Image: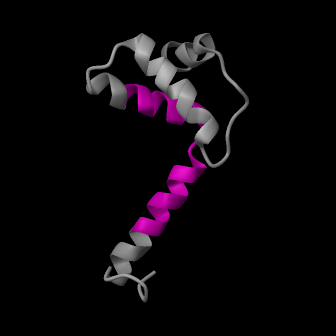
Amino acid sequence: MVRSTALPRGEAVRVVFDVLAYFDEKTEVYVRRRHRELQSGGLANAEIFERIAAELPRRAVAPPELSLRQLRRMVYG
């Protein structure tokens, strides 16, 4: 990555680790994180959970299909 970009070695290493961490993120952690992000953007819960449900199948390792109720339980218990 250092050879193919203008990034210094330390920054390239950090980017690689950030990408690996993103793809290693468990479904429950992803759902909670996205809920916080979308909520802070002013979206209502109904729209948030619909959006998350649409995003999950496009993840690198897609989880089994989850209902909106299951998604809400991941966030609120």
Quarter the C terminus occupies: top right
Q: Position of residue 76 (x, y in %)?
A: 49, 13
Is residue 41 shown left or right of residue 26? left
> Quarter of the image holding residue 36?
top left
Residue occupying the point 41% across, 84% down: 2
Residue occupying the point 54% across, 34% down: 55
Residue occupying the point 63% across, 36% down: 57
Is residue 49 shown left or right of residue 11? right
64 or 54: which is nearer to us? Answer: 54
> Quarter of the image holding residue 13?
bottom left
Q: Position of residue 64 (x, y in %)?
A: 73, 30
53 or 32: which is nearer to us? Answer: 53
Structure colour scheme: one colour
Numbered marks: total: 0
Q: Residue furthest right?
A: 64
Dominant SS type (magenta)? helix
Q: Residue furthest bottom?
A: 3
Q: Position of residue 54 (x, y in %)?
A: 55, 28
Is residue 70 shown left or right of residue 1? right
Is residue 50 shown left or right of residue 6? right
Per the rendered image, the range of residues in magenta is 15-36
Residue 38 magenta-drawn?
no
Residue 34 magenta-drawn?
yes
Q: Is residue 73 above or below residue 38?
A: above
Residue occupying the point 27% across, 26% down: 40
